[in-house]
Image (spheres, rainbow, N blue to C red):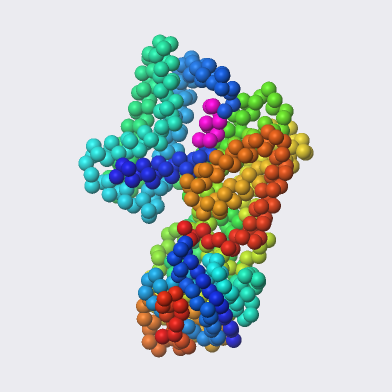
Amino acid sequence: MLKLILKTLSKEFYASHAGLFLFAFYLLFGIVEASQLISYHKTLMMLIYSSPLVLFLVFVCWALYLLKCLFFVKKQLKLESYRFVFLLGTGAKKTQFQLWLSLYAVLFLPILLYALPLIYIGMVYAHYLSVCVVLLCLLTLLVTVSGYMFRIINYSHVPAKVYLKTSLPRWNKPYWTWPFYYLLKEQTLMLVGSKVLSFALFNAVMWVFADVSGDIRVALIGILAAILAHSILIHAVLKNELDRLSFTRSLPITLSSKMGQRILVLLLLFVPEIIFYLHRTGYQPAHIGAGLLFGLSGLMGLQLMLYRVKLDQDQYLKWLLGFFFVSMFIVLANYYLLYSLLILLGYLFYFSFLYDKKDLREI
Amino acid sequence: MISLDLENIEKKYGDHTILSFEKWRLDAGVYWVKGGNGTGKTTLFRIISGQTPFHGELSLNQINLKKQPVAYRTMISYAEAEPQYPSFITGNELLNYHIALRKADRSVAEHIVEQFGMTAFMNNKIGGYSSGMLKKLSLICAFTGDIQLYILDEPLITIDANAAQVLYGLINQYQAKGSSFLLSSHQELEPGRLSLKATFQIKDRKIEAC
C-alpha cells in the first residue's frame, strides 16, 4: 500500500508543485556563485540560530508547507480514484500510522534535506538547545499530521464541525466568472496559497536583486516567478473546464467569444500581480506594456503546455522546468518582448485552428 | 426536414478504433441507437454533437461541422448520459446561460422546468442535486431554443417514471414541430410511446439498421 500511495499521492504532489520547487531551488542554489554557495548557506543557517524569533519564523514556514501537503492529500482523497485509500481503515493502527508518517516524510523531504545541514551547523557551533527544538519541531509536525490522517481515514463517518461559514453575495453569475467561483469556493486554499507564494517569490526576487532593481529584467524575473506560482491554479482551472464545462463544446459559441473569455480570465487572475509589479516599477509606460504582455503570455504558455501534455502532471513538470529556464535566459538576453509576442501568437493560433482537434477527455 | 450526413468517419482512442464507416445518412424522424456498454454509442453522439475530434466529414442540412462550427452547433442540442456541471452555480444560472446563448424563449423553458417538477429546485446550487435532478436539468437545457436535431444520450437513466413520461411527451411534441431526435439507450424504450423511424446498432465499428 505504501508503494502505491507514494507512486500516486507523492508523485502528483511534486508534479503539481513543480513551479514552487523550481523557484525555491533557484533561490537557494541559483542566485549565488558556485564558489560562494557553501558560505552563503552557512550564513543563512547561522542567521536561523541567531534569534528565537527567526527560528520560530522558520518553523511557521515549515508548518505552512506541511499544511499545503495536508490540503493537497485531503483534496485528492475526495476524488473517486482515491477511494481505495480508505481501505487502510481495515489495517492495524500502527501500520496505518507508519504509512502516513512515511508519506508525509516523503512530501516533507525538501525540508528534511535542508534540516540535515542545519542540524550539523547547529551542533558544530554549539546551539544544542536550538538543535533539540528543531528536531522536536520536525517530529511534532510529522506525528501530528500523521495522526490527523489516521483520524480522517478511520473517523470519516463523524460529521465535521463548521466553525466558519463563508458565503459570497448571490447574483446571476455570468459564464466568465465561473472559473473564479470555482477557485474561490472549491480551491480556496490553493488560490490563497498560490497568491501568497506569488507575492513572496516576486518580493524575494526584488530583494535578492535590490542593487539592480531599476532593471526591468529583474521585475520580469519576478513576474516569471509569479507565473510559475500560478502553474497549479492554471492546471486546476483547466481540469475543471474539462470535467464540468465540457458541455459547452456542443454549444454555438463563437471563436472570438471563447478566446475573449479565456484571455479575460487569465488577465483578471493576474491583476493583483500586475498592480504590484507596476507599484514596484514606478508606473513607467514601457514597463506597464512589457509586464502585462509577459505576464499574460506566460500564463498562456502554461495553458498551451497543459494542452500539449493533455494535463499529464509528470509531463507538465518537465515542460515547466524547460519553460522556466528558457524564459529566464530570454529575459536576461533582453528578448522578452519578442518571446511574449510569439507565445501570444501561438496561443491565438492554437485556439483558432487546433483547439477543436484535440479532446482532453481522451486521456 | 433535416439531413444528417456522416462520411468516411473514423474515430480512434489511441490505437483502438471505436468507429469506422463510410456513410450514414438520416433524414427527419426519431432514431434509436441501441446496444450494450462500450459499443461506441456515446462516441458516435459526441462526434455528431461536435464534442470530440474525428476523421471524416459531418454535416447537417449541408452545413459542415468543421467548416461552419457555430452554424452547425446552433442547429443541434446534446444531452450527455452523465452530465457534469459546476457545483457552485444554480440550476437557473445554467439555464439562463443556455437561454442567452441560444436566444431562446424563457417562458417555454420555464414551462419545461415546471413539467419536470424542477421549479422549486432551480435556485438551489447544482452541488446539492441528486443524479436524477441533474439529468432532468440537462434535459431542460437541451430543450432550450429552436433546435433541429436533439441528441439525447441515455435520456432515461436515473430519471423517475413521471419524468420519463414528460420526456416522451416533449419528444413527440417537438417532433410534430419538425425537429428530429437521435436517442441512445441500452434499455428497451417504452413500447408505443415514440414513433421510431428506425433503430440502429453499432457492430464491428459500423452502424447498421436493426
Work out whether residue A50 or residue A215 is closer to the camera in this orientation and state it.
Answer: A215
Image spot of residue B102 (x, y percent): 61, 71
Identity of the residue furthest to the front in this view: B15
Image spot of residue A69 (x, y percent): 42, 38
Image spot of residue B68 (x, y percent): 65, 71
Identity of the residue furthest to the left in this view: A92
Q: How many marks?
A: 0
Examine the rendering and report whether any part of residue A330 can be seen: yes
Where does the C terminus of chain B fall, quadrant-wise? Answer: bottom left
Where does the N terminus of chain B fall, quadrant-wise? Answer: bottom right
Magenta-colored stretch includes residue A24? yes
Image spot of residue B174 (x, y percent): 53, 83
Examine the rendering and report whether any part of residue B144 can be seen: no
Magenta-colored stretch includes residue B23? no
Residue lying at 48% horizontally and 47% vertically, measured from the top left: A313
**Residue A293 against residue A66 in the figure, above or below:** below
Identity of the residue furthest to the top in this view: A126
Residue lying at 46% horizontally and 79% vertically, measured from the top left: B207
Q: Is residue A182 left or right of residue A134?
A: right
Residue lying at 48% horizontally and 24% vertically, measured from the top left: A57
Work out whether residue B85 or residue A254 is closer to the camera in this orientation and state it.
Answer: A254
Would you say the magenta stretch is mainly helix, strand or loop?
helix
Q: Which residues are magenta?
A: A21-29
**Residue A256 against residue B20 in the figure, above or below:** above
Residue lying at 36% horizontally and 51% vertically, measured from the top left: A82
